Amino acid sequence: MRRIEDFRACHDIASLAKKMVELERHVMFPAV
């Protein structure tokens, strides 16, 4: 996920989770 530009600004779990839901990546990575 570090290769995806949209996730480079995420420095903690909360911001990562919010960004994943915004981009609908939580469907691809359900364990996160």
Image (tube, helix red, strand yellow):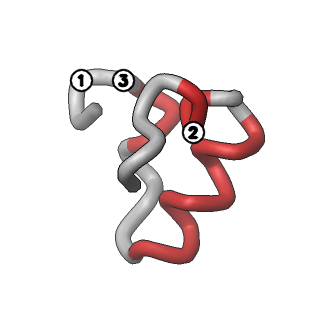
Q: Which residue is mark 1?
A: 3
- As displayed, is residue 10 above or below residue 11? above
Say whether residue 22 is left or right of residue 6: right
Residue 3: image quadrant is top left
What residue is rendered at 37% in x and 44% in y?
A: 8
Name the residue at the front extreme.
31
Please state if 28 lies on the left or on the right of 23 as rendered. Answer: left
Image coordinates of residue 19 in percent, x first then y, are: 63, 48
Q: To which residue does mark 3 refer?
A: 4
| Disc 3 residue type (three-letter) | Ile
* Amino acid on which disc 1 is placed: Arg
Whichever of callouts 2 and 3 sits on the residue coming sooner in the sequence is 3
Q: Percent position (x, y) of residue 27?
A: 59, 29
User: What residue is rendered at 41% in x and 35% in y?
Assistant: 29
Image location of residue 26, percent across then percent down: 57, 39
Q: CA distance from mark 2 to mark 3?
A: 14 Å
**Residue furthest left as drawn:** 2
Element carrying mark 1: loop
Q: Is residue 17 above or below residue 23?
A: below
Q: Are marks 1 and 3 in contact (CB under 8 Å)?
A: yes
- Who's the residue at 56% across and 67% down the image? 15
In the figure, 26 relative to 32: above or below? above
Residue on which the image places disc 2: 26
Q: Quadrant of the N terminus?
A: top left
User: Which quadrant would the C terminus be assigned to in this image?
Assistant: bottom left
How many neighbours does mark 3 have within 10 angstroms: few (below 14), some (14-19), or many (20 or more)? few
**Hey, what amino acid is under mark 2?**
His
Residue at 59% of width from left, 43% of height from top?
20
Sequence-wise, the earlier of marks 1 and 2 is: 1
